[in-house]
Amino acid sequence: MKNNIQELRQIAGWSQAELAKRLNVSRQTVNALERGRYDPSLPLAFAIAQLFERQIEQVFQPDT
Amino acid sequence: MKNNIQELRQIAGWSQAELAKRLNVSRQTVNALERGRYDPSLPLAFAIAQLFERQIEQVFQPDT
DNA sequence: ACCTCATGTAAAGGGTGTTTTACATGAGGT
DNA sequence: ACCTCATGTAAAACACCCTTTACATGAGGT
């Protein structure tokens, strides 16, 4: 599962720490998601999409 | 997180076991999702939405 | 009464998502 | 040289997702 979190975050002008705070997760979680270490839970995926005013499919793309 | 899995499955005319097979998960997983015992992983949420030809937001609705 | 099918549930176990604490590196500004 | 900020990473701990195996219930058909 790929994602555009880093790109969206940089467009917004936020650090990983700032994004983490807005999502109520740790900075390490944001870093891990951007680096593709694992996928977020579904509720976190919704929070990310809502924060960036995108649909989930616009932020996350399945490998297949 | 609420979802419309049961409704979509019934419209498709499938049993929980049939849906599970199409999703490559166990029947217990389908049952647990329909009954709201937990949320699916993000990849499974994508598979469900794609199977029913819906957007993720049309299948899953955050509580907030 | 029996059989089958669909559904609900439970327990144990492996794998994944997220946290806290902590340390390391590089870039920029003083 | 120093300080600060942003980023990357690691280990331990905990909760959650999903599996297999198993049993229980109710509805419908014979």
Image (tube, coloured by chain):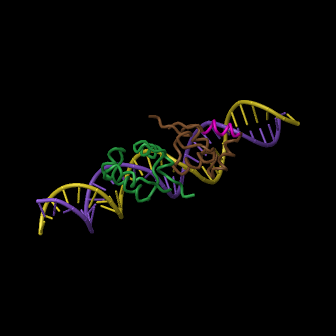
Chain colours: A brown, B green, C yellow, D purple
* D6 displayed left or right of B52: right
Toward the viewer: A1 or C17?
A1
Judge whether residue A8 is colored magenta. yes
Characterize the magenta stretch by its predominant secondary structure.
Answer: helix
Count of numbered circles in the view: 0
Residue B56 % position (x, y): 49, 46
Q: Quadrant of residue C3?
A: bottom left
Taking the spot 53% from the left edge, 36% from the top edge, the residue there is A2
Q: What residue sits 41% from the left and 53% below the top? A: B5
Give the quarter of the image for residue C20: bottom right
Residue C21 on image: x %, y %: 65, 52
Q: Which of C29 and B57 is in front in this view?
A: B57
Q: Residue at x 59, y 37 (%)?
A: A4
Q: Position of residue A58 (x, y in %)?
A: 55, 39
Task: State which region is magenta.
Answer: A5-12
Q: State the quadrant of the C terminus of chain B.
A: bottom right
Picture coordinates of residue D9 (x, y %)? Answer: 59, 38
Does A43 lie within the magenta span?
Answer: no
Taking B5 as reference, is A32 above or below it?
above
Q: In this view, does C30 lie to the left or right of B20?
A: right
Q: Which residue lies furthest to the front in this view?
A: B11
Camera-side residue: B29 or B52? Answer: B52
